[in-house]
Image: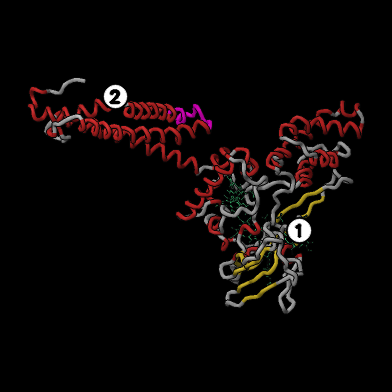
Amino acid sequence: MNPPEHTSSGNRNSKKTEAWEKLLSCTWKTPLGIIGVSLTTISVTLIIIGFICHLTGLISDHYFFIFTFMFLPLMMLFGLALIPLACYFRRKKWFQGSLLNTNHLQIDLADKQHRKGIVLFLILSVINLTIIVLVLYEGYTFTDSSYFCGVVCHEVMEPQYSAYQRSPHAKVSCVSCHIGTGSSWYVQAKLSGIRQVKAIISSDFNRPITAPVENLRPARETCESCHWPDKFHGKKIKEFISYTNDNQTDPQIQEVALHIGGRNPVTDEFEGIHWHVSRNITVEYQALDTKRTRIGRVRVTKPDGTTEEYSTGNDVPDKGVTPAWRTMDCIDCHNRPTHIYDQLDQIIDFGLYSKKIDSNIAGIREDSTTILKIEYTRRNEAIERIVPDLIELVSKRHGKDYVNMNRDKIVRSGTFLLEAYLNNVWPEMKVTWGTYRQHLGHLNSDDGYGCFRCHDEVHKTQFGKAIKQDCDMCHDEPE
Ligand code: HEC
Ligand code: HEC
Ligand code: HEC
Ligand code: HEC
Ligand code: HEC
């Protein structure tokens, strides 16, 4: 501790300086002060090192990220808060033992020592603030990133994250769908996030995660920030390719021209499939179960304000469900715009069509179905078993010699099946073929998915007008 320049600044000044100096320097010596100073110094040093590692891409582990950008800044702030606290206690104690009131703390800008101190304080504060702002910003963007959502809750979100990465929305962040605009959404999302973290820690969540999701369900506005319904019009041709076990070499190709609809630029009327979400129409419905696969009453409000109500005549809800009106939105049809899982037979047919499964191996379509339906207990088990299991099935059918001659082809087919399995099945999360199904079309209408939930000719108005199932209303054959 160097004494200040007594000679030049005179006695009065030196006393003031002394008061500061005693306070500050002795603060280091109190246990609280030492803890504060060390915590701050260590965290700042580690943050700087971590920041450099992050910027240069040296370490990209997410636990490292959480440590550097969430844990260390908290430690740093805590340490910084301890220092003035230590000063305060120190001063209190110091006054107790002293009768000298002249030693009051004063800032005297004429004092060189004081000026130095102030400048030092300001510089350190700016450095600290910059670090805090940078780090908080990084941490904030990180908690909003798809990577955070998908990877940090690794096991839980893996099915969703994996499907998302292969989807048309792979470059759209989780938050742009799951979190609407406005602060109330933001708060809701973060609160729900905290609940989710708690649920994960206590392992108290549904496996599989239930759909529909309630709190983080994308809203119509979120989709409409990118897709403008007024712009839909015309038809969209879609091709469906399928095989049968009896004929696994010649594909059946079904083409449908979907009446996408939207606003007809000629008549200015809304029509076709996107009629349900047109600006001047409201379609509401009451679900009779929590999955919204059984639909009771349906109500349409037309542009002139008149309403039409459809009912099955037997709208008995599931136990514990009180039907409530819900306005139909994009997600009632596009429930899987991004977490898209394959259907078991569709993915096998795709394998045959793209020649990844060798259709020259007789019976391979049936065997592939058998393999993909096996309930392995863990994904690792599937990784080990799928190819050998397929070889065994083919061997049963055609004999060992056949397998030895065609091993390459069988292994290639098995590898495709393994990939299909890994894209769709997570036994740990109880996600398997058909867990999450989509509402577009009517492939799963037996289980209550798709358009036929309403378009079943059973939902009728009191005058007997039904929600129709005419094939031509929704699609026709492409010209
Ligand atoms: C294009 C919009 C979109 C994006 C991007 C998106 N989601 Fe979803 N997500 C949805 C929709 C729609 C649902 C189904 C909602 C429903 O049925 O209520 C859903 C459902 C979920 C569910 C509930 C389980 C399920 O499969 O139905 C989870 C968990 C989930 N999303 C996580 C994520 C994560 C993690 C990301 C980012 C990696 C993400 N989502 C990105 C639209 C999106
Ligand atoms: C941030 C912008 C953004 C948001 C938000 C968004 N999408 Fe998309 N969507 C895209 C992009 C980009 C594509 C890819 C377009 C392409 O491939 O031509 C796409 C493609 C699609 C497709 C066509 C997929 C296909 O198979 O060709 C559908 C359907 C779709 N989105 C529905 C939705 C729904 C429903 C929502 C709300 C839950 C939504 N989108 C939210 C940007 C967005
Ligand atoms: C009544 C059900 C239904 C509703 C409601 C609905 N869609 Fe669609 N949408 C469809 C169907 C069916 C298709 C065509 C099937 C396909 O592309 O696989 C489609 C196609 C699309 C496409 C792809 C268009 C193209 O040309 O490729 C986009 C984008 C889209 N919808 C966005 C939306 C948005 C945004 C909303 C909400 C404002 C919405 N949809 C509401 C059923 C619906
Ligand atoms: C919640 C119930 C409900 C669901 C689910 C539903 N619709 Fe509809 N849809 C209706 C009602 C109600 C009408 C109006 C019937 C009328 O006025 O004759 C309608 C009318 C239509 C029309 C005629 C629109 C026009 O041009 O006037 C088409 C096309 C259509 N739906 C396609 C679909 C498709 C495709 C799906 C599935 C992706 C679907 N709907 C799912 C309730 C539903
Ligand atoms: C309410 C609208 C609607 C009605 C009514 C409807 N379809 Fe469809 N259909 C669709 C949609 C939407 C798709 C596309 C699904 C997709 O994009 O995955 C589709 C796809 C198909 C496909 C190809 C996929 C498959 O299932 O193999 C066939 C075949 C088909 N429809 C036949 C019919 C026949 C036959 C009728 C008349 C009994 C009919 N549809 C009535 C909406 C409808």
The reply to whether the C-beta atoms of the residues labelled 1 and 2 are less than 8 Å apart is no
Residue 157 magenta: no
Neighbor class of circle 2 (other Cα within 10 Å; few <14, some 14-19, many 20+) is few
Tell me the residue that label 2 is attached to: 29
**Any atom of ligand 5 within 8 Å of the CB at mark 1?**
no
Q: Quadrant of ligand 4?
A: bottom right
Q: Amino acid at mark 1?
A: Ser
Q: Amino acid at mark 2?
A: Lys
Using the rendered image of the protein, determine whether residue 376 is visible from the camera's viewpoint: yes
Looking at the image, residue 26 sits to the left or right of residue 397; the answer is left
Q: Point out the frontmost of discs 1 and 2.
A: 2
Q: Quadrant of the C terminus?
A: bottom right
Q: Quadrant of the N terminus?
A: top left
- Residue 348 point in image, percent of width and height: 78, 43
Q: Which residues are magenta?
A: 52-61
Looking at the image, residue 414 sits to the left or right of residue 288; the answer is right
Q: For the point 78% across and 58% down, which residue is it?
A: 446
- Residue 36 point in image, percent of width and height: 34, 30
| Mark pair 1, 2: CA separation | 75 Å
Above-or-below relation of 302 to 379 = below
**Count of number-bearing discs:** 2
* Residue 146 found in image quarter: top right
Tell me the residue that label 1 is attached to: 445
* Residue 423 found in image quarter: top right
Q: Specify the color scheme.
A: secondary structure
